[in-house]
Amino acid sequence: MVDIAFYSITGQTRRFMNKTGFTGYEINDADPFHEMGRQFILIVPAYDDDMMDSVIDFLQYKTNHDNCIGVAGGGNRNFNTLYNHTARDIATGLNVPVVFEFEFNGTNKDVENFKKVVNDLGTK
């Protein structure tokens, strides 16, 4: 299975992760310098770029940039074109796909679908 790294500001992304039952590495603002050491999916909330400094530091640390194979994003559809813009921007910068999008902390169906994405990526 592929690993997961995630960043949560308001707790929505953490709640989504908890629902999945997957164990993931939570990027820490105080010390974002953690090397994943193998392929992973990054999950991020949709926030202004200046709030993503810890995620950028994490991605620039050692081999994390090369090991990220996809980005998932949580957001709020009320923000229209800004819905999950952070995940899309990071994916574009890393030249990897956006593998999943969910609103707020995800529905039960979102959790089920995300688990399938993670499992499918882990078998490739």
Image (cartoon, rainbow, N blue to C red):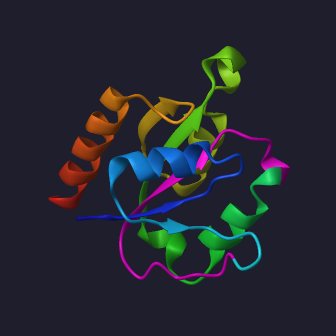
Q: Which residues are magenta?
A: 32-50
In this figure, what is the number of numbered marks? 0
Q: Quadrant of residue 41?
A: bottom left
Give whichever of 83, 97 is nearer the camera.
83
Quarter of the image with the C terminus in it: bottom left
> Which residue is depicted at the point 65% across and 42% down?
86
Could you say where residue 17 lies in the image, as x and y percent from the top left? 45, 51
Q: Position of residue 109 (x, y in %)?
A: 31, 27
Q: Residue at x 69, y 26 (%)?
A: 82
- Quadrant where the image shows the N terminus: bottom left
Residue found at the far left of this picture: 123
Front in this rendered view, residue 72 or 8: 8
Closest to the observer, 66 or 41:
41
Whether residue 110 appears in this view of the structure is yes
Residue at the spot 48% in from the left edge and 31% down from the top edge: 102
**In the shown orientation, is residue 42 left or right of residue 50?**
left
Q: State whether residue 71 appears in this view.
A: no
Task: Give the farthest residue toward the right.
Answer: 50
Task: Note whether 113 is above or below 78 in the view shown.
Answer: below
Image location (x, y in percent) of residue 97: 42, 44
Residue 110 location, quadrant: top left
Compared across the picture, whether 28 is left or right of 23 comes to: right
**Residue 25, how many percent across, how many down?**
49, 69
Please say whether residue 35 is one of the residues in the magenta stretch.
Answer: yes
Magenta highlight on residue 25: no
* Residue closer to the observer: 29 or 15: 15
Q: Residue at x 34, y 30 (%)?
A: 108
Above or below — where is 68 with respect to 14? below
